[in-house]
């Protein structure tokens, strides 16, 4: 947040920014729900299954800027695209690693997703890796993305022939993990050839679950209440590190794939000449595999869920695919961008 207070030495924001961990100035001026409970905070009327809906209800009652407290932690919310755009002004606000994201720091460290704004690797990695997401780079990934999609449809064809149901969320996880692993790092986890998840996926789910549990346990009690889970989490992190280290070691013996991993290992910053350290390369790979594929698989799963419940929308999306692809067996890269209605289906899924 904007301000003038300097954070704790070694891990705080630079002068000119105020971290949320240091408290909010004049917090009492921001509206909050009535009937706050000691220790628990603003939990009356809240439901674990509808947190977003609860927050929107408070926004309607309290206004576009309001706050809520839970287990000793204060959260300030803004409502509306205008205020969100205002907070995205990088001249006045810095990248903030919030509570849930901070819990992933032991896993991804100063990777792009979990890096603090003031950490040098945040800007270094951003500048080095940005060209890997250009239009030309995406076109280069197209063939690999099609290959993974075809493995998914082949799996579903086999299930249909055998009269078996398919696990859509599980297969979306396989799809996105293999897509990111292939396009970014030239690796194949073999997710479609095995009935059980790859150990990397199991460890990843474990670390994400542990990070979420930390949000619900008061910090002073966490070492006692989560002792066994903490040991399991340490083993999961070790598995993630081991898997990625093996992947990087294999690449060092066979470079030249032209993907994100090559860029991480071989590209220097265009201005400073700096390179990503081996430790940060590992953290970036874990970041892309964990943060990238889990969110995308969720979006795809919900998109298919909504399409299954609205056959008229599914029919319109299918008709667009038939029209854009024509008689071709598979789409060219340029044809994907012409699927305007399909894109709107995805956008509406994200909104919902």
Image: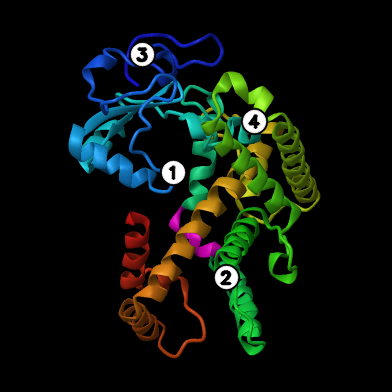
Please state the extent of the stretch shown in magenta in the rendering.
134-141
The quarter of the picture where the C terminus appears is bottom left
Q: Position of residue 101 (x, y in %)?
A: 51, 34
Which residue bears the numbered disc 4?
Answer: 106
Spatial distance from mark 3 to mark 4, Cα to Cα? 27 Å
The disc, 3 or 2, on the residue closer to the chain's N-terminal end is: 3
Of tags 3 and 1, the one toward the viewer is 1
Q: Is 285 positioned to the left or the right of 11 in the image?
A: right
Corner quadrant of residue 104: top right
Of tags 1 and 2, the one toward the viewer is 1
Which residue bears the numbered disc 1?
Answer: 48
The disc, 2 or 4, on the residue closer to the chain's N-terminal end is: 4
How many labels, in total? 4
Q: Position of residue 266 (x, y in %)?
A: 66, 42
Q: Residue at x 36, y 13 (%)?
A: 16
Which residue bears the numbered disc 3?
Answer: 16
Answer yes or no: do the residues labelled 3 and 2 have beta carbons within 8 Å? no
229, above or below 352, in the image: above
Which residue bears the numbered disc 2?
Answer: 143
Q: Is residue 222 visible?
A: yes
Q: Is residue 284 visible?
A: no
């Amino acid at each position: 947040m904007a301000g003038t207070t300097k954070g704790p030495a070694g891990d705080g924001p630079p002068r000119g920014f105020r971290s949320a961990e240091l408290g909010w100035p004049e917090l009492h001026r921001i509206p909050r729900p009535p009937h706050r409970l000691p220790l628990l905070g603003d939990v009356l009327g809240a439901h674990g299954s509808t947190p977003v809906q609860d927050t929107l209800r408070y926004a309607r009652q309290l206004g576009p800027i309001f706050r809520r407290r839970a287990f000793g932690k204060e959260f300030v919310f803004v409502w509306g695209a205008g205020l969100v755009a205002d907070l995205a002004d990088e001249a006045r606000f810095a990248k903030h690693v919030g509570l849930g994201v901070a819990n992933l720091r032991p896993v991804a460290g100063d990777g792009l997703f979990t890096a603090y704004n003031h950490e040098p690797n945040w800007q270094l990695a951003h500048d080095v890796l940005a060209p890997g997401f250009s239009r030309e780079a995406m076109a280069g990934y197209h063939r690999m993305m099609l290959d993974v999609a075809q493995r998914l449809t082949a799996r579903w064809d086999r299930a249909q022939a055998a009269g078996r149901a398919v696990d859509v969320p599980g297969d979306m996880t396989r799809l996105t993990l293999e897509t990111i692993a292939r396009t970014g790092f030239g690796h194949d986890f073999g997710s479609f050839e095995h009935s059980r998840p790859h150990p990397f996926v199991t460890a990843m789910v474990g670390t994400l679950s542990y990070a979420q549990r930390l949000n619900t346990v008061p910090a002073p009690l966490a070492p006692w209440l989560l002792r066994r889970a903490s040991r399991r989490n340490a083993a999961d992190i070790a598995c993630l590190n081991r898997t990625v280290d093996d992947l990087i070691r294999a690449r060092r013996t066979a470079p030249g794939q032209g993907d994100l991993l090559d860029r991480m290992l071989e590209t220097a910053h265009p201005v400073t000449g700096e390179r990503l350290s081996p430790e940060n390369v590992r953290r970036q790979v874990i970041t892309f595999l964990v943060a990238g594929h889990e969110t995308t698989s969720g979006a795809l799963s919900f998109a298919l869920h909504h399409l299954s419940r609205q056959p008229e929308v599914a029919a319109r999306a299918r008709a667009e695919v038939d029209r854009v692809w024509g008689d071709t067996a598979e789409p060219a890269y340029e044809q994907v961008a012409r699927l305007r209605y399909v894109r709107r289906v995805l956008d509406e899924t994200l909104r919902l």
